[in-house]
Image (spheres, grey):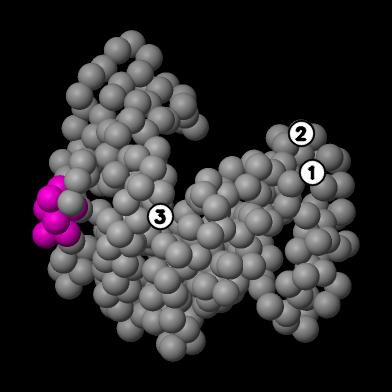
Amino acid sequence: MDFDIVLVDVNQTPRFERRVLEEAERWMIYVDEMGTKWRAAKFEASGPLLPIEGCVKGRDDFEAVKARLDPEDPSRYAEGFEKVVELHHRKGKFVALAIWEPFDYCWRLRGFIQLLTDMVRDPGFVRDMFNFVADFQVKLASRAVDAGIDGVWLWDDICYKNGPFFSPKLYGELLLPAHRRMTGFFEKRGLPCIYHTDGNVMGVIDLLVKAGIRAMHPLECKAGNSIADLKEKYYNRLVLIGNIDVRALSSDAETVKEEVVSKLSIALPGGEDT
């Protein structure tokens, strides 16, 4: 669709063998390169895709995963990575390295429900995992920084339609320091961090800004995020990306136009000054 922002990626997984464990007519259970076990529909491109469990059952398992994560391994980058970045720059694109941030990375290793439980019952373990992943991702990204990327796209989903999956207090104690380990590294090199999370971000967005996030995506409209409220509060402090209602995008052309124009009428004025 010729977006202004182009994402480039790198192999950030522990490189477990991808394998199918069970298979039926319409679904399968498989393990991916993160060691995460999934149940997936075989003939539906968009799902359902449900995580079952992670490979890390305790600290010993996490130590074994750490041993598989060498950020200096050159094979983690595809051949010709630098040329790809250069080609996108020639086309006038903003090139962002796409990586998982610590929460997203660790729930894949530990299991989603188990990680949320750990954040309450074993915060020391969670803090160790988050900080290790933050440091690993920073080291892994160094080659992309040298290649001239323009920013970093942090993949995550810490919210659902009613707010964050965990309290702002837990975010501040466990995840914010890990985020700062990442954003601080990139800030020193003049690279903004763009943060992706679905769901309603209104209860945690102040902390994300404090953590060094400079842009937010997708500001999911159907989860209650308001571009008017966000612009009023974060004008000149945070780049706002999205807030187009995906329900309108599945309708007719006139409905799509009305949705996009209504949001542009709010978001566009003053945007050229930022």
Q: Quadrant of the C terminus?
A: bottom right
Q: What's the amino acid at mark 1?
A: Val
Residue closer to the observer: 128 or 224: 128
Which one is earlier in the sequence, the residue at label 3 or at label 2? Answer: 3
Labelled pair 3, 2 in contact (Cβ < 8 Å): no
Q: What's the amino acid at mark 3?
A: Phe
Task: Report the residue at 47% width, 54% height from top.
Answer: 156
Residue carrying label 3 = 103
Task: Report the residue at 83% width, 61% height from top.
Answer: 228
Residue 172: % across, % down:
50, 65
Q: What's the amino acid at mark 2?
A: Ser
Q: Viewed as shown, does residue 197 lie left or right of 133?
A: right
Labelled pair 1, 2 in contact (Cβ < 8 Å): yes
Task: Give the distance between the C-alpha atoms of the residues marked 1 and 3, in whole angstroms.
Answer: 34 Å
Task: Give the distance between the C-alpha atoms of the residues marked 3 and 2, in whole angstroms.
Answer: 34 Å
Which one is earlier in the sequence, the residue at label 1 or at label 2? Answer: 2
Q: Which mark is residue 202?
A: none
Q: Nearer the viewer, mark 1 or mark 3?
A: 3
Task: Report the residue at 33% width, 83% height from top.
Answer: 146
Q: Which mark is residue 256?
A: 1
Task: Give the distance between the C-alpha atoms of the residues marked 1 and 2, in whole angstroms.
Answer: 7 Å
Question: What secondary structure is marked by label 1?
Answer: helix
Residue carrying label 2 = 251
The residue segment tinted magenta is 60-67
